[in-house]
Each structure stands twice: as structure tokens, then as C-alpha cells.
Amino acid sequence: MEKKNGNKKKQALVYKPYLKGTLDWKKILLRGLRIVGYYGLFLVAFLLMGFVLQIEIGVLRWAVNLFVVAVGALVVYATGVSDGVQEVTQGEIAWGQKEKSGAVPDEDLRKCYNPVKGWLVFLAAAVILLALAIPHALTAQKQVYSLQPLPDWVEGYRGHEEITAPLAYYQREYAVTVTGIIQIIVRMMIYPFVSAAALDSKDAMLLVDRLSPVLILLPALG
């Protein structure tokens, strides 16, 4: 008996020609903003599932948080693939149109696939994300303590000057600053890394803050 496997020939891949498109800067910017919009959705998702990401077992906590980051990158990747497939299809149509009529309208060319578009979309999103992450990384400081509520029995000693002076620190009013708002936004955007590191040490938390410009771009690289 002849072996069927030996008679099988490898099927050659067929590559359909497509017309390389031109750059559509408006669409590139909008797609970059769409990626930033995904980060807003990620932020909301992290808020809703925050307790799940704060598992006390270190190895398991890191595994769960890295999995969440991978899911975010997969969402961005799937969106990019969908856009690419549509543009390649449009490029194939434009190729056929060029073969028949010899001319393709600029509007149709802007809809066709161009490998540079993906990188430009990433750069458009990166500019916005880094505008938040870089200032946060440069101003990040190690958090060593936080003020706790004073016990009720302290109220009876507020008349003594030697007691009142040290306690004046508790009366300071802290205004909401731009730096504080940026810190909250960036930390929420990279919450899986914050969640994984914050329970280990303050030094690890500071390292995450310093690396935030790199960490915030990981899902967008998808």
C-alpha cells in the first residue's frame, strides 16, 4: 500500500496582491485616541475587580495581575488585527480597480493598508500616555507614612502649648494638586503592577512609579 502522506504535496500559499495605501492622519489620531479610551475602560475594570487583584499569596498575585495585563494587550491587538484585515481587503479591491482603470482615488488609497499606520497609531497613543506617566515618574517619592485619626482622649490636652504645637501638623489642609491627580490616574492605569508591588514593599511601589512610562505602554504595544 502506498503511503498517502508520501503522496501529499505541500499546498503553496497564495498571496493576493494589494495596493499599499497612503496615510490618513485623521484616522491615525482617532485610532490613537481609541487606544487611550481602552485605558479608560481598563481603569474602570481595575476599580471593579481591585480586591481580586490583591491576593496575599505573592506568586499567585503576580500571576493574576500579569494575566490581566496580557488580556488588555490582547484587546488592543485584536482591534489592530481587525483594522488591518479591513485595510488589506480594501487594498485588494484598490489593486483590482487600478488594473482595470489605471487610477485609484486618494480617498480609497487612504483606506488601504500601510504597515506604517500601526506604528503611527501607537505613537499617537504613546504621546498622550507618556504626557501623564513621565511627570508622574519624575515626581514620584517613596511613601513612608500616612497620618491616622487622633484618638478622642487627645482633645483634652489641646489647651497645653507643648502638646498643641506638635499636633498642629494634623490641622494642615492639603489642597488637590495637578501632580496628585496625575498620580491617581497613572496608578489606576497601571493598577495590576501597583497591586502586585504595593503589598510587597514601599521600595517596590516606588520602582513601579519610576517605571510607569514603560509599564503604561505595554498594553498599547499589542
Image (cartoon, grey):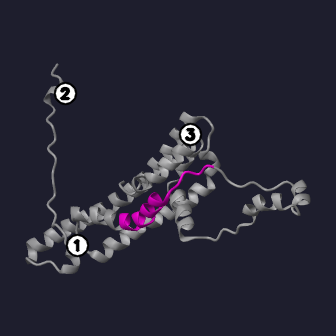
Position of residue 201 measured from the top left corner of the image (x, y, whole percent):
57, 41
The disc labelled 2 sits on which kind of residue? Asn
**Which label lies toward us, 2 or 3?**
3
Q: x, y (%) of residue 215?
A: 43, 52
Query: Please, what is the three-letter code of the amino acid marked with disc 3?
Result: Arg
The verdict on residue 131 being magenta is: yes
The mark found on residue 23 in the picture is 1
Q: Earlier in the sequence, mark 1 or mark 2?
A: 2
Tell me the element at label 1: loop
State left or right for residue 113 relative to residue 39. Answer: left
Q: Kindly identify the residue that appears in the image at 79 percent across and 56 percent down.
A: 149
Magenta stretch holds residue 140 = yes
**Residue 53 appears in the rendering:** yes
Residue at label 3? Answer: 61
Please tell me which of labels 2 and 3 falls first in the chain.
Answer: 2
Can you say whether 157 is above or below 177 in the image?
above
Quadrant location, the N terminus = top left
Q: Let me know if residue 35 appears in the view.
A: no
- Disc tally is 3
* Mark 3 surroundings: few (<14), some (14-19) or many (≥20) residues within 10 A: many
Q: Which mark is residue 164?
A: none
The secondary structure making up most of the magenta span is helix
* Residue where numbered disc 2 is placed: 5
- Magenta segment, which residues? 125-144
The answer to the question of whether label 2 and label 3 lie on touching residues, with beta carbons closer than 8 A, is no
